[in-house]
Image: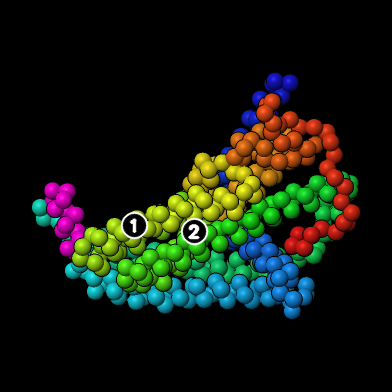
Amino acid sequence: MAADAVSRNALVILATIAAGTVLYVLGDILTPLALALFLAVMIDGFARVLEARVPVVSRRLATPAAIVLSIAIFGGAAFFIADNASAFATQLVADTPKLNGLIARIAGQLGVEAPPSLTQLVQQLNPTSYLGQVARGLQTFVAAAAFVLVYLGFILASRRGWERKAVSLFGDREERQEAVAAFLRIRNGVEQYLWVQTVTGLMIAVASWLAMVAIGLDNALFWAILIFMASYIPVVGGIVAVALPPIFAFVQFEGIVQPLILFGVLQAIGMFVGNVVQPRMQGRSLNIDPIVLLLALAFWSVVWGLPGAFLSTPLTTVMMVILAQFRGTHWIAVILSADGNPGELREGRVEPPSASGPAKPTKTPAPKRRSKNLPSGT
């Protein structure tokens, strides 16, 4: 039995390496599909919220209304950023003398006698050589966005057929109920993550905007929207929120009082929301170890780039739920979880951990469900 366990664990590790290689090689194909699935879950949750909270929205109109509102929100945010990016770049060029002065002050503190100017640094970087790469990157982004929309349309159009597919895949009623329960857990975890990140991101963005307006920082609304969008990326979002506005405050203001005040206020906002508000809202919805989230961010960023950074937490949630369903991979889900109790095994139910020791699987069956149909969105 020990040899079988070692062989099984070795196969799991080899399968993980092979899966990572496939994800990296097929990234151009799988990244739009993953983004489309993520958007489909978001739209499905948004539609159910509209149906429950808005009386005039019926079940038939909920999904189209959610699609229209989502496109309007994301399109408006993208248009605002693109519209203000040119003004921000123009102001950055006008602030070139101040940037040269800031470089000179920093170089003087570091003991550099003749620091290069901003113009010399730009010439050394030779940005014209990167124009082709930037153009190809923009072309890739537009193509990926088109693929995401195409995938999203087909996913939303074919979701009703998944009920019949599930019936064909899981002929046994109990197996079908277990599959539905796993899907609901994945969907609820992703939706809860989206809800928490959206609410806390709005709180940080609004509070940061008030702080930046209070000290008179230029382009405060532009920075606030960037902070909100960066909040969906673990770790990196917090660095963007705390570091970038004070750096540009150093450029705008002559002294160091305003930048230091802004840095302290933004740091306090991030710590309060991250350590007080977010844990209370999040609860046990994710149940993923923070170190695992950091490693997942690094892994998915290497595999899929910026989209992988956005999707790192939802993808890790999905992986943990799926791995927890099978005894052979349950130990990986235990490592990924925060409290050592990732959830149910497919063969039985895992009891909550007690003071006497870790959780042990039992053979008590899952509760019966009366519903024969799968939930909306499958």
Q: How far apart are the two marked residues, 1 and 2, measured between alpha carbons? A: 17 Å
Q: Main secondary structure of the magenta part?
A: helix
Neighbor class of circle 2 (other Cα within 10 Å; few <14, some 14-19, many 20+) is many
Split into 4 quadrants, where in the image is the N terminus?
top right
What is the secondary structure assignment of the residue under circle 1? helix
Q: Which residues are magenta?
A: 100-112
Instruction: First in sequence, mark 1 or 2: give its number.
Output: 2
Residue extending farthest left:
113
- The structure residue drawn at horizontal position 30% and vertical position 64%, both measured from the top left corner, is 248
- The image shows residue 366 at horizontal and vertical percentages of 83, 42
Q: How many marks?
A: 2
Drawn side of residue 262 relative to residue 225, left or right? left
For badge 2, the amino acid type reads Ser
Q: Report if residue 102 lies within the magenta region.
A: yes
Question: Closer to the camera, 98 or 276?
Answer: 276
Please name the amino acid that badge 1 sits on: Phe
Q: Identify the residue position indicated by label 2 in the image.
A: 231
In the displayed structure image, the side of residue 338 where residue 211 appears, left or right: left
Rate crowding at label 1 as few (under 14), some (14 to 19) or many (20 or more) other CA atoms within 10 Å: many
In this rendering, which labeled residue sits more in front, label 1 or label 2? 1
Residue 91 point in image, percent of width and height: 29, 74
The image position of residue 331, as x and y in percent, is 66, 33
**Percent position of residue 318, x then y:** 65, 49
**186 on left or right of 212:** right
Disc number at residue 263? 1
